Every structure is written in structure tokens, then in C-alpha cells.
Image (cartoon, rainbow, N blue to C red):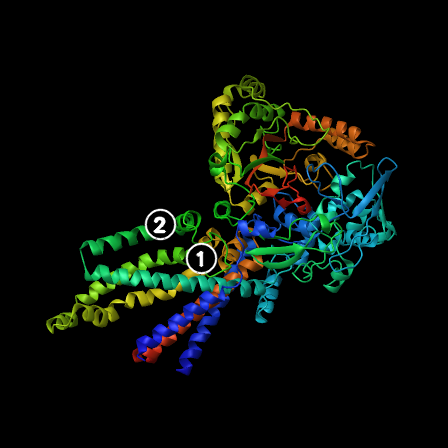
Amino acid sequence: MTYTDRFKLVSLAFLGAILLSGCGGGIPNADEAAEQGILLIGNGAEPESIDPHLFTGHPDATIIASLTEGLIAYHEFDDSLPEPGIAESWESHDNAQRWIFHLRDAQWSNGAPVVADDFVYSFKRVLSKALASEFASMLYLMKNARAYHTGEIDDFSQVGVKAVDDKTLEFNLEGPSPHFLSVLTHPTWYPVHQDTIESFGGIDNRISQWTRPGNYVGTGPFVLEEWVTNQIIKVRKNPLYWDADNVALEGIYFFPISDLHTENRSFENGQLHLTKELPSDLIDKYKGEPTYRNDPAIIVYYYMINTTRPPLDDVRVRQALSLALDRRSITDDVVRRGETPATGYTPPGFTNYDPPTPLRYDPDKARELLAEAGFPNGEGFPLKQILFNNHSGHQAIAEAIQQMWKETLNIDVELFNQEWKVYLDTRNRMDYDIARAGWVGDFMDPDTFLQIWITEENDSLNDTGWSNPEYDSLLRKGYQANSIEERYRNFEIAEGIMLEELPCIPIYWYRRPFLIDPRLKGWNPKQLDAHHFKFLRFEN
Amino acid sequence: MLSFILNRLLQAIPTVWAIITITFFLVMTAPGDPFSAEREMREETRQQLAAHYGLDKPLLVQYGLYLKNLATFDLGLSFKQEGRRINDIIVESFPVSLELGLLAMTVALLVGVPAGILAASRKNTVLDYAPMSTAMVGICMPTFVIGPILGLVFGVWLGWFNVAGWFSWEDRVLPAVTLGLAYAAYIARLTRAGMLETLGLDYIRTAKAKGLPEKTIVFKHALRGGIMPVVSYLGPAMAGMISGSFVVETVFQVPGLGRHFIDGALNRDYFMILGTTIFYATLIVGANLLVDLVHTALDPKLRKA
């Protein structure tokens, strides 16, 4: 054997080894998977955490929804309706301030019974300071939860939740909470298994390995089977789930494909049944196809205004800026994803909530208000900046708005873009004039949109410098209201004030364009895009 | 020889230390917060998180702690992937990047070298212009253009390959070809230039005068000298393929280290940025050291220096 031959042989063996090393993990294509009852789903991004108490974003929540179920589960059609989960039934007393939940005979995926104490332990975990759960404040609805979380009290038994017996859980809330059931669908309220958490480092261990395959114990219709970072998360049917007989799928494969066009090619190539999001430039191509869906979402796109900087501190200027926007043209000519031009702030979709919708396009009124504020025909208006994070979509919208303000009000604004984290920093320090922003609703109550505009001591999330005592008191009155109707009436007036004052200029309400395999049934339009996987099935 | 190795090792250590130090302070002082998001976190939660990851301590203390952990090869925890150690993430994803890099290198050499030889031996003919202009296009076309096109043609239209994922050996083909083609183009040009220079040398004229067949002249005599520029290029090319495959990894959903490297920076996942940078730096410094050693072993003139 000559040197060259040997070299060839070694190279061949080497190549072969590389190729073989990848074999064995074949993934069924969409047809085979549908046949086997396995759902292939594009999930947008690698989850940050699938611990229900540490989750941060939608990709996390989607996976958690397959693994764990709370007292109240996601409804099949409407996110504002309660679907019995671990709780079989419930009753409320004292104007919805005291709630009692009756647990069904459910099991953890390791066979242990689900008991009321599991929930008490879980809430204690969320409120443990050292766990630093991002959504811990959602639990402040319970009496003394805030005090426990901030360390004012050390005795968890003073917090308004207790296990009356194994199957009965009682809540004492800070105030009447007629919306409590919809809040309970949020993963922060889901239970975790006490012995599992304790055996992986204890109640407040953030870096616990209990969420790894083989360790995860949940109450949901599926159990965690495999997790390869940036590649796949596999879950398979949980035979111990209380409603396992009604679970049609055998398993779900979540693919964390972050590039929308890669996801689209995967769908076209028969590697997915469901995509996370259709890229804007492909919407026209798919419109009218049986695979195309464009569901409404409760997400608002808006421009926040730094109300501490003149002349933006003048409400007439802010109103003029808003009235000068032709929102229809922004949604139809610029964004072109089927969005609804915003006529108010809170997106439609909250049953019985009917806030004022004063936003409109009125160039004459806009010019008049600007003149009143001391800038007739825009004269003397100082140069202001629109801040946005690097993204071609935000850029296009900002350019359109820049032009509208120039044409209607004869004022100049500059566009200023920053990398995402720098932009957040700038916004947070209020070192901007006007900044783009978006807000996604977390639960089916308008409070999920209104609460960011309330002024709490030392803690304002709105970063616009805006604070209105009347708004705050109306919202607080709403929190203490005895009925949903009364709660919403207060919220509606409060939102009206905010839309009059315009610390932010709402631009449009999102929609959610995506592609779906027509054989997949049960993935219904949901306001929160929260789906219970037990309702999904394949039909030919 | 031993003193030379020791000498070079002692030089490598301050290099890596400098990279660690500069990266550490750049990362820590860069604007932006690892915990910021569209939804602003409550200040008390933010402080708890900062305390959890030790970010509440003075910068110099953090630096000291980081070096101390590094001494035990502990690269710390990721902020973004809850509960995961950077060490584990590198161990999991680097083999993927390495495999992709090696396959791409194979593609690059198998395509680039023959194209360059062909072009050089048929100088100023169609067989020269065609591969060279193709190579020019290849150099100019970024992988984020070639990748999707290959995905559409060989995945969606012809149905030969998956367009995303890293499960079976077929899934290796498109990413490796995409990454390899960009380098193949450059290798072809290098090969052509090297071959042309060698083919003009006296000993080749002698070989021709002796009446040797062209095949023997090109492959046996000219190629040895002509390939040298390519050989020198292989080191940086390999480093580039392994560390710079971010785009290909994104386009084809390949779970390699390149994505952690870039995502770490975008997310201000401090220990992820530091860990991946230090890992790549050590890798490249180590590879250079190795190349130097080989050079020295081959060239006695260097040994004395």
C-alpha cells in the first residue's frame, strides 16, 4: 500500500465515521408523523426555562402547557372561559374574595397523587425571594403574598392560601377578584412536585436540574422525553394524566427554529405541521391557501412618549401627533399583515370590556392643536427622535410616521435605531423622545394591559414619566370591585383618561399569521395563543 | 526543542489571559442588561437575579472570582438557559460545529483544488474563465443567500434533503456544502495563483523539456509547490469554519456552538460570551502553537531562532 492509498483509506474511514455518527435519530416527516399521531411544531426559539415558575416567554409556555396543568386549564376555543384542569369544581364567596377549589383524583407523572398541599408548596416556591421568579407579582392577588415575597413577613401560613384537606384548596385574596379563574391559567400558578423539587436542590434553587428529561415530573397530558438544545424537545403521551383517554396525540416534537424563513421552508418540505409565524413577505403568497391562518392576538404596537421633555410634555402636542397618523395606511401599505389599526389601547377580545376608542385620523384637528400648543404650521418645533430597535419592520413604520408628521404637521423627526439590549437600556433610562414598544397580554383581563400605566411607589413600568392620580384611583377601585361589570366600568374610564392624555400613541393591534397542516384539528384561534394539547388531533 | 515549546507555551498563556481580561471588561461594561426585556422586570427581582449570578459585587471582585473559577475550568452558568452550565453547552454543541467545519473543509478542498488546477493548466481558456468567474460569484455570494437557495432547490423542490435539523447524515449535506462553497471559491483562486507561479518556474520547464507528460508535470511536480498557499490558508479557514458558522447554523437549524456565541452576545449572557470566546481563543492559540511546532520540526533554520 502506497502512502497515497493509505491516506485515501484513512480519509474514507474518517468521512464514514463522521457520517455514521449522525445516523439513528431520524425524524418522521409530516405524513408519517400524522399517521403516528405525532405533532411537529415550530416553536420559535430555544426555551429559556420549562420550569413553570421560571418561564419567561411564549416558547417556554407552549412546552410547559404540554407537561403541566394547573387548577384551571386552557379552554378549547376561548381563553376567557375556564376549563376545569386539576380542579374539578370551584366556588367563590365574599364577592369573589374567597375561592374554594375541589381537586379531582389526578396523578403526577411519577404516580404520586396531586394534593392541595402541592399547590401551597408551589406558591411558596414562587414567592421565595431567592428564586427570583419573574412573574412572582402575579401571585400578589393572594392576601399577604406581597409581604411574604418582599420579606416583610416570614410566616407563609399568613399568606392567603391553605389546604383544607388533600382535595380542597382555599384562597383568601387581597380584594374581590372576579377575574381570578382567567389568571389561574398562567403557568406561574401551576403546581410543581414537592419531593422532586426538594431532591434537586430545594425550594428556591434557580439552577435546579429537575426540568431535564428523566427528572421532570408534571401533571400534564405529556411527559418530557428528550431535549437537545437548539435542536428538538420531544414529549410523549402521559398515561397517568387524568384525562389521558381523551388525548389523541401520541407525542409532540418542538423544533426551536428561530429563523422564520427556515421555518417556512421546513413546513414546505413536510417537516412541520405548524409554524410559529409566517414571514411578512410571504403573506401574499399564502393568502387563500388552506394552510394559511391569520388569528387575532391581544398584542398592541405603540409609540411611547417621554412626557418629561418639552414640548412632548404638552398633551396637545401628543394629541396632535396621534391625530396626524393615518393608521389604516400604516397597516395596509406598510406592515401588511392584516393588522387592525388601533382605535384605542387595549386590543379587542376581552368579553364585556368596552373601552372608549377615540383614536382617529384628523389632520385638521392635529394642526389646530399643534398651533394651540405654540407651533403653528410646525414652526419652532424642536427636532425630536424616534427610537426603535434594529429591525426592518420597525424601520419601515418609523419612516412612514416620520413622513406623515412632516406632511401633516410640518415637523421634522429623526430616526434613531439601536441594538435590542441597548435600546431597552435607553428606554429604561428615559433617554429618548419617542420610542417604539409593544405589549403582549398575559391573561384574559384588561388589567394585563392597564397595570403598566399605574404609578406604584418607586416602581413604574411605563418609562414615560406619566403618572395620573385619577387613573391610579380608578384602577384601584376596579381592583376592589365586587363584580366583573363594576371592575370593567372603572377600567374603561381609566383607559379613557389614558387615551386622552396619551403617554403612548397606540398604532395597531397585532395578528398572528402562521401555517398549519389542514389535517391538524383543534388548534383554534385563541386570544392568548394558549392551546391545550389534549384537544388536538389529526383527521384526514 | 523542549525550551522552545516551553517558551511558546509561556507566550500563549499571557495571550489567553489578555483575551480573557479584555473580553471580561468589555462585556461587563457594554450597554444593556442581561435581564432586560420588553416586559420590564421589577427592580427587586432584578436585584435578586443579579445577586444570584454574583453581578452585585464590585467589578474587580467579579473578575477575581471569574478567574478563580476558570482555574478549575468552570465557565459559570448561562443566564438565558436556566440552570445550564457553559461547560455542558460547549461539550454538547462544539462537536456539531467541528463536524460541520470538517465536512465543509472536505467540500471546499474537493471542489476548490481541482478547479484551481484546471484553471491554471488551461490558462486563459474557457476552462480557466468558467471556474474562476464561478469562484468570484461564490466569494461574493454570502452564505445567507446560498443556504436558502440550496434549501429551496434540493429540499423543497427536489425533496432530496431536509431543510432544517441535524438528525441524519443527509442533514449534513446542505449545511456542509453551503459553508464549504464559500471557502472552495477562495481555495480555487489560491490554487490557481500558486499553480501558475510554480508552472512558470525553471524546473517545470526542465520537466517539459525532458518530455514528461502534462499530467505528471502538473500533479507530480507543480502541485507540490502550487498547493502551498492553500496549505497556509487551511489553518485560518478551519478556524473560520468552526467559529464562524453562525449563519449556516441558523439557516439550517444546526445546533452548533456558533449560535450560542452570537446569541450570547445579543442576550448579554455574560458567561456565555466569555466562555465561548475563551474556548475559541484557546483553540486558535493552541492550533497556532501546533502549527509553529510543526514548522519548526520541518525547518531547521527556525529551531535556532
* Residue furthest left as drawn: B209
Which residue corresponds to mark 1? B245
Front-lying residue, B208 or A345: B208
Up/down of B166 relative to A293, above or below: below
The residue identified by callout 2 is B141
Residue at 20% x, 64% y: name it: B197
Q: Quadrant of the C terminus of chain B?
A: bottom left
Q: Observer-nearest residue: A118 or A241?
A: A241
Residue B209 vs residue A20: left or right?
left
Q: Position of residue B139 (x, y in %)?
A: 33, 53
Q: Position of residue A203 (x, y in %)?
A: 76, 59
Q: Amino acid at mark 1?
A: Ser
CA gap, disc 2 to disc 1? 15 Å
Q: Is residue B237 visible?
A: no
Quarter location, residue A117: bottom right
Residue A125: numbered disc: none
